[in-house]
Amino acid sequence: MAEVDLRCDQIYGMHTAVAGQENRYDVYVTNTGATALDNFLVEVLDGDNEVVGTVNVKNYNLDVEATVIVPVECQLKKAVESTQLTGRVVVDGDEVADNNTAVIADVEVLPGETYTMVQTGDLRDNRVAGYVPFNLNDMYSASQMLYTQDMLGFGAGKIERIGMYYVVSRLEYAKDIDLKIYLTNTEETPLFSWIPENEFTQVFDGKFSLDEHNNTLVIEFDKPFEYTGKGLGITFVAEGGNSNYYYNWFFSSLKSNTVASLSYSGDEAFDFTQVGVDSESYTDLAFFVNNAGAGSVAAAEKAALDAYLAGDQLYISGEYDRLTVYGIDGTKLYVSEEPQTTVGMSGYADGAYIVVLDNGGSQTVKKVMLNR
């Protein structure tokens, strides 16, 4: 056994990335030498052999035969239809040179001037859930999740793909699962009951399998979804799970004190009339958004006066002269003749409110619901 030897076992991550933006790739490193090591370098290289991400691991104490997963934030420089990324580990005195790299192939890099990748949740928590976006322990499962505008953090655009991280700790990797995905623009928050099926647009109908040599799943929609910059409802309906897939779990986060998801699993096929189990959990989805033409969408939104709630914020779009907020009993609660795009409502009680937007001789009336 060599005294100093680090092995790069594998590099995991999404097979879709966006040029010029940070994209996370996990590099697995094992100490195969005879001495514990506490300082080493982990790199990711692109198809041109240029370094696109680096982590200098210090004071870690990687023991003999131990493995560590090093997340590396990478910034790929140019759009390509297909390339490979190489994970590499570098340590002073490494006596074995032929085990320092691992490759992930067939990575598509989308142009950064057109696309945005938005990651929701906090992957650093390493939190998983077995019931969102689906429960692969049962033949039939479904979930419906609500992503508010503040959770998403991006405006209007066409959502073309989603990605998610998973972990399989035991048994088998799920294979040939039938999946349907539905999206809708919505103002409902929180999620007290299933948003009806007729309010959704189906964007995917196909199959997926989990790759035992990766930890991410990217699904390209059958058709893009036009997101208008409000809340986003998403429904997953899966068929084909079994008890061997029980430990197929997806990374998730919590929306504290808010019903962020409803889920169902069982032996009967899902429909939107079944009783759902509510939860604060939601899947850490990555959204791949095509921004081409988003300016015209935003302009259309601006031209059409609108008001909606996201969390404790009232958002207003369009041009107006006067904003008035009334209680459901008609009590005037707030007036502004200074155009603004947001109004804080953290001091208001839960319930329904009427928002009136006056613009010249026309008036737009919106009913909004504050429910934390």
Image (cartoon, rainbow, N blue to C red):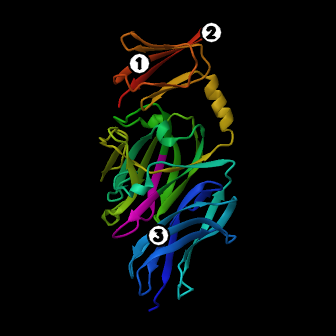
Give the left or right position of residue 334, taking residue 364 as reference: left
Q: Which mark is residue 360?
A: 2
Q: Which residue is mark 1?
A: 353
Q: Secondary structure at mark 3?
A: strand
Asked whether residue 275 is drawn in magenta, I would say: no
Closest to the observer: 307 or 75?
A: 75
Q: Position of residue 91 (x, y in %)?
A: 53, 79
- Badges 3 and 1: C-beta atoms under 8 Å apart? no
Q: Which residues are magenta?
A: 165-181
Q: Which residue is mark 3?
A: 58
Q: Secondary structure at mark 2?
A: loop
Q: Residues within 10 Å of mark 2 (few under 14, many from 20)?
A: few
Tell me if I can see residue 206 in this picture. yes
Q: Amino acid at mark 1?
A: Tyr
Which mark is in front, 3 or 2?
Answer: 3
Q: Amino acid at mark 3?
A: Lys
Q: Which badge, 3 or 1, comes first in the chain's sequence?
A: 3
Tell me if I can see residue 240 in this picture. no
Q: Amino acid at mark 2?
A: Gly
